[in-house]
Amino acid sequence: MKNKKQALIIISFLSILFILSGCVKNDTLVETSDKEIIRVGHNQSQNHPTHLGMLAFEEYIESQLDNKYDVQLYPSELLGTQTNMVQLAQTGAIEIVVASNSILETFDEQYEIFNLPYLFESKEAYHAVMNDPEIVDPIFKSTKKSGFETVAWLDAGIRNFYTVDRPIETPDDLSGLKIRVQQSPTNVMMMKLFKGSATPMGFGDVYTAIQSGVIDGAENNELALTENGHGDVVNYYSYTQHQMIPDEVIVNNKFLENLSAKEREIFNKGFKILEDTQHNTWADSVKKAKERAEKEMGVAFNYPDTKPFRERVEPLHEKFLEDNPSLQPIYDNIIKKSEELETGGAQ
């Protein structure tokens, strides 16, 4: 059954590629050539920091290896939902994909740790952990057995709830609301503890689902309001700050293994350029998104006390460690790094 499902996904993907064969790349038609095509898929718009990072990656790789590779970018879920794109990366039908950590949780349980609500005490702690290879490398390489590995992490900001009918001031305000969450068991359990109704769905379906009343809201960073138009269909954005979940750049194993040592060195630098470009444009993009959502879209921002939300989801941390005792050392290191930053003990 699993093989049949993957075959159907590949067939659908090939059909999409056929349709997109005349697609635009850098405002010009893609021309056929003898170069090896590197397909890069993600679910964000062309104005998003992730796409800007990909453009920098494309420019660098082609400047260094233009005689061999043609990097083709497919934003806005043109190649399917994140879950479908990850499955295609497993098979090698897509070489590079940007996927939320929440999606990767379903491919290896080690990724689940970054989906825990209120894992990080601050944005600084979040970045310090994600930039620490001793913590993240074992997790990033854990999916090699599934056909891919993570080569870079991208900032996806701080996730908060946004709703149509009322602001979220306390956990009880979520009671009975149908909220879109990412397709992650951890997120579903989080909403259950908040007494809301979790509605997992692909990111591309959220706007229509809110507009039609299928769901009462969603949770994401501020850019979802502007880059994806969600600010046109919701009225309130509540800074519950319940998750800091990275996006990860994953690459098919066979593609990486077939690179020469020199090519791998160039690609590693390209991945670093992608990561740095995305990070450097993130904060400014969030600031502009918030201003636009408030002034042009009429979204009201509120700042609830996060302590009751933290207390409500503490059982999720306990259950995670009970179900995954092997990840206790990683969890402890994350908490330790956060505490060091809070007390000024880390450089």
Image (tube, rainbow, N blue to C red):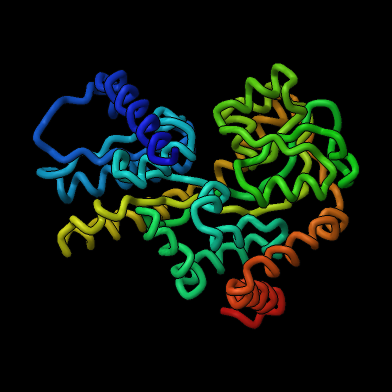
Above or below, comparing residue 227 to residue 153 in the picture: above
Q: Nearer the viewer, residue 314 or 299?
A: 314
Specify whether residue 337 is in view. no
**Residue drawn at (18%, 55%), measured in percent from left and top?**
258
Residue at 34 percent of width and 55 percent of height: 271
The residue shown at (84%, 39%) is 174
121 relative to 91 in the view: left or right: right
Q: Position of residue 310 (x, y in %)?
A: 81, 58
Report x, y in % for residue 235.
Answer: 78, 27
Which image quarter: residue 21? Answer: top left
Using the rendered image of the protein, determine whether residue 43 is visible from the camera's viewpoint: yes
Residue pushed farthest bottom? 345
Instruction: Give the total number of marks visible in the rendering.
Output: 0
Q: How far from the left and from the top, in percent, is residue 249?
A: 41, 51
| Figure quadrant of the C terminus | bottom right
Q: Quadrant of the N terminus?
A: top left
Q: In terms of depth relative to the viewer, which is nearer, 225 or 262? A: 262
In the picture, measured across the screen, residue 76 lies left or right of residue 245, that is left
Q: Residue at x 64, y 83 (%)?
A: 345
Query: Residue 63 at what x, y percent from top left?
Result: 18, 46
Closest to the observer, 79 or 243: 79
Q: Using the image, determine if residue 237 lies above or below residue 114.
A: above
